[in-house]
């Protein structure tokens, strides 16, 4: 401020930017060092303690050493809670270590040996020392950063541009975290799936028609299950199809009404209401299907059958493709309608006017001009919805049943890929049998399907956008 | 020489303008958008087989008036129209009138060319199909050909009728829109700044076209270009702040207007 001689306009950047610049220099390097220190110091300390352990322990192999190390750390935590008198008693060996620690609420697996106390004290002193040094170093770096930044400030200094660059960096880090996570998930699924394919051949998985994985209880090795994907895939696609058959007409008509006919008042109330449906957790839809829709369909089918044949036997199972599809369809309606609504309202007004100006009615305009113009976008929206239907889990877990079979009767139970993933991964597990690893193979297959659907949908939507820009 | 004689014929026509019968009569027309009043008791008549130009600065209500003539304002929720507008002595705001039929009789061409994202052929047949004007494929073909010919586009597109209408150049698109409007055989064609999105050459073609269409249709055109109004119209109406300032023969309007505001606007002193 002084160097600008009191004139604000002489500064390249507003004072606030200089402040932010100094703050960034004070905080960012210090925080970075702090993070690195916190991550790295336990390794060094553990190494030091490990080497301090008696040779008798080290000679027993890596596993024992790690076990002992764990105990030492527990003791170390415990020692901190002891008063100095008790501590003296423990170190001199006059009182039992285990009892003293147990009194403070720190349980120990065994009685503990004298060297442990020593090692634990060593550990504690190292850790405290490290904390002290760390605080000091971080503080010094923070002050140094701030001083460096303050000294760099002058009237023509471009603090604003520097701050801009830091902002850019922050945003970049945030987005790369999201992308890297996705890559990591795909990577871990792939590696597990590859382990699965080492024990089951890919052709047996992708083209097998029988799903019978047997039990995966520990120690029951030798039982070979059959892992045919096709019945699961058939169930998945069938249920998704029923859901789409239900959701597409309803959602599309709702969207047309919202976009073309509804008065602003109606639209203002109805659209958020419809979108609330999208906010209901799918597990809620699931038990809605389980306790309401399923039994209702079962009872009504029994009544219908009774009226026609006199035999009151239900022909729709409570858990069936129809139940799951219907409820999933209800869940999908808001997706279809709000996506299509956006696309329909994007059709330029001039096309509407052109058609109306030629003496077409509203419905003629919608049927002959707006829908054809919006069709590619709507198809893209439907593909996005379909990928949701394929990946949907909770509704089908509760409403579709677990019978893996290939059949065409929508009134019978079928099962889906997601249901089987849930089945294979719940309960007591050992993570090296094909029975559990198959879940990852299923997961990666599902992922590939939805990814393809999404990419294709985005491609179509983008192509459509270009048309009107 | 030919030009001269044509101009002479024009002159003769213009002088008889006062005897040409009215096609549409607007009486005390007012338009409100919600609370805001956009048009104040406009009394403007449109003569048969005449090009009437509506001029005036932006926001003066000329487009609004144009859109009352085929009730396009109905598509705007908050819009309300009072007064009386007749087409061949029939009140077009009468509750018993069919808006759809009215718009078939009073066609419209918009500011921005807005061909449907369909083929050229389908663009032209859109109206006739809706109104059932053609029974057979041959009838439709005939309508397409005559409409495109009237719009001066036939020779340019006859070999690619089934290509998309949006692939044409701006000027061709606008003439396609005119062909589309002509295809339903309207009596009146409303044009809302039809050349504002076109380059000078395309503009010249459309203006020439308007000239020719005049023999069969009554045309009302909104324009921002004074020269265009002078070139294509026989009658000119000047709007200002929602009021009709003056309506007169185009020649008189541009040489010796009655109203000072018209004089100022034409001379470029405002607007």
Image (spheres, helix red, strand yellow):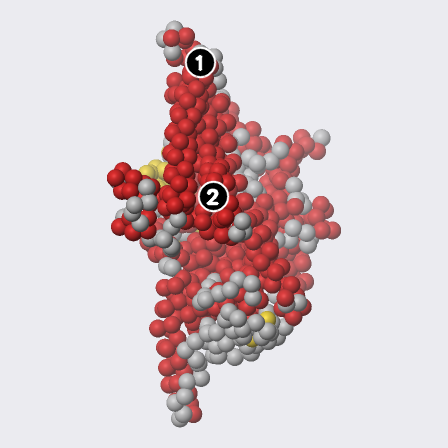
- Residue A18, compared with residue A414, is above or below; it is above
Give the residue drawn at x 50%, y 76%.
Answer: A403
Q: Is residue A428 visible?
A: yes
Q: Is residue B145 left or right of residue B61?
A: right
* The C terminus of chain B lies in quadrant: top left
Disc on res. B262: none
Q: Of all residues shown, which one is farthest toward the top?
A: A5
For the residue pair A424 and B92, the one nearer the viewer reads as A424
Q: Is residue A39 visible?
A: no
For the residue pair B86 and B141, the one nearer the viewer reads as B141
- Residue A99, compared with residue B10, is above or below; it is below
Q: Chain of mark 1?
A: A
Give the residue drawn at x 46%, y 14%.
Answer: A152
Disc on res. A53: 2
Q: Chain of mark 2?
A: A
For the residue pair B119 and B221, the one nearer the viewer reads as B119
Q: Quadrant of residue A24?
A: top left
For the residue pair A345 and A441, the one nearer the viewer reads as A441
- Where residue A291 appears, as percent x and y from the top left, is 35, 73
Residues under labels 1 and 2: Cα distance? Answer: 50 Å
Q: Are marks 1 and 2 on the same chain?
A: yes
- Where residue A351 appears, as percent x and y from the top left, is 52, 49
Q: Nearer the viewer, mark 1 or mark 2?
A: 2
* The N terminus of chain B lies in quadrant: top right
Q: Which residue is mark 1?
A: A151
Give the residue drawn at x 47%, y 62%.
Answer: A392
- Residue A429, compared with residue A115, is above or below; it is below
Q: Quadrant of residue B112?
A: top right
Q: Secondary structure at mark 2?
A: loop
Give the residue drawn at x 65%, y 41%.
Answer: B169
Determine crowd level at label 2: few under 14, some 14-19, many 20+ residues with C-alpha closer than 10 A: some
């Amino acid at each position: 401020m002084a160097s600008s001689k009191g004139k604000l306009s002489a500064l390249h950047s507003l004072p606030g930017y200089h402040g932010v610049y100094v703050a960034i220099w004070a905080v960012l390097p210090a925080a970075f060092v702090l993070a690195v220190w916190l991550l790295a110091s336990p390794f060094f300390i553990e190494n030091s303690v490990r080497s301090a352990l008696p040779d008798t322990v080290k000679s027993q192999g890596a596993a024992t050493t790690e076990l002992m190390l764990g105990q030492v750390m527990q003791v170390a935590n415990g020692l901190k809670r002891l008063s100095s008198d008790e501590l003296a008693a423990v170190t001199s060996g006059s009182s039992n270590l285990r009892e003293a620690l147990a009194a403070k609420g720190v349980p120990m697996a065994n009685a503990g040996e004298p060297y442990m106390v020593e090692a634990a004290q060593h550990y504690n002193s190292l850790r405290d020392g490290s904390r002290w040094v760390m605080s000091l170093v971080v503080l010094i770096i923070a002050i140094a950063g701030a001083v460096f930044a303050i000294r760099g400030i002058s009237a023509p200094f471009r603090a604003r541009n520097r701050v801009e660059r830091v902002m850019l960096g922050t945003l970049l880090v945030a987005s790369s975290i999201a992308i890297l996570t996705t890559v990591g998930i795909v990577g871990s699924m792939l590696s597990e799936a590859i382990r699965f394919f080492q024990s089951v051949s890919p052709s047996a998985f992708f083209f097998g028609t029988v799903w019978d994985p047997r039990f995966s209880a520990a120690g029951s090795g030798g039982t070979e299950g059959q892992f045919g994907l096709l019945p699961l895939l058939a169930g998945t696609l069938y249920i998704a199809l029923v859901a789409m058959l239900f959701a597409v007409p309803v959602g599309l008509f709702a969207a047309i009404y919202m976009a073309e006919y509804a008065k602003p008042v109606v639209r203002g109330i109805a659209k958020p209401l419809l979108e609330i449906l999208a906010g209901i957790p799918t597990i809620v839809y699931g038990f809605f299907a389980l306790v309401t829709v399923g039994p209702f369909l079962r009872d009504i089918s029994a009544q219908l059958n009774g009226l026609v044949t006199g035999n009151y036997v239900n022909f729709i199972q409570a858990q069936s493709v129809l139940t799951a599809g219907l409820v999933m369809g209800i869940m999908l309606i808001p997706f279809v309608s709000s996506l299509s609504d956006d696309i329909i309202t994007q059709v330029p007004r001039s096309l509407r006017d052109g058609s109306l100006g030629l003496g077409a009615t509203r419905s003629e305009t919608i049927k002959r001009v707006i829908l054809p113009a919006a069709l590619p976008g709507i198809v893209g929206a439907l593909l996005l919805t379909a990928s949701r239907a394929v990946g949907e889990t909770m509704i089908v877990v509760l409403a579709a049943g677990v019978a893996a079979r290939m059949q065409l009767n929508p009134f019978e139970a079928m099962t889906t890929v997601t249901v089987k993933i849930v089945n294979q991964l719940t309960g007591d597990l050992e993570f090296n049998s094909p029975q559990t690893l198959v879940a990852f193979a299923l997961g990666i297959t599902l992922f590939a399907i939805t990814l393809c659907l999404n990419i294709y949908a985005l491609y179509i939507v983008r192509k459509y956008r270009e048309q009107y820009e | 020489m030919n030009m001269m004689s044509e101009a002479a014929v024009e002159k003769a026509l213009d002088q008889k303008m006062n005897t040409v019968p009215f096609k549409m009569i607007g009486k005390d027309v007012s338009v409100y958008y919600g609370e805001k009043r956009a048009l104040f008791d406009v009394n403007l008549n449109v003569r048969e087989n005449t090009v009437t130009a509506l001029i005036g600065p932006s926001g003066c209500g000329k487009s609004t008036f144009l859109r009352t003539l085929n009730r396009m304002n109905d598509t705007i929720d908050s819009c309300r129209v009072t007064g009386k507008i007749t087409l061949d002595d029939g009140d077009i705001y009468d509750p018993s009138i069919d808006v759809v039929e009215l718009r078939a009789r009073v066609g419209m061409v918009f500011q921005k060319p807005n061909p449907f994202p369909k083929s050229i052929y389908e663009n032209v047949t859109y109206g006739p199909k809706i109104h059932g004007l053609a029974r057979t494929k041959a009838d439709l073909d005939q309508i397409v050909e005559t409409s495109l010919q009237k719009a001066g586009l036939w020779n340019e597109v006859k070999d690619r009728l089934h290509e998309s209408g949006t692939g044409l150049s701006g000027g061709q698109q606008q003439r396609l829109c005119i062909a589309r409007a002509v295809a339903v055989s309207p009596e009146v064609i409303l044009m809302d700044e039809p050349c504002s999105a076109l380059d000078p050459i395309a503009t010249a073609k459309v203006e020439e076209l308007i000239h020719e269409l005049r023999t069969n249709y009554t045309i009302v055109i909104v324009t921002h270009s004074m020269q265009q109004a002078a070139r294509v119209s026989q009658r000119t109406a000047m709007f200002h702040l929602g009021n009709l300032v003056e309506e007169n023969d185009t020649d008189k309007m541009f040489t010796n207007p009655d109203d000072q505001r018209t004089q100022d606007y034409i001379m470029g002193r405002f607007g």
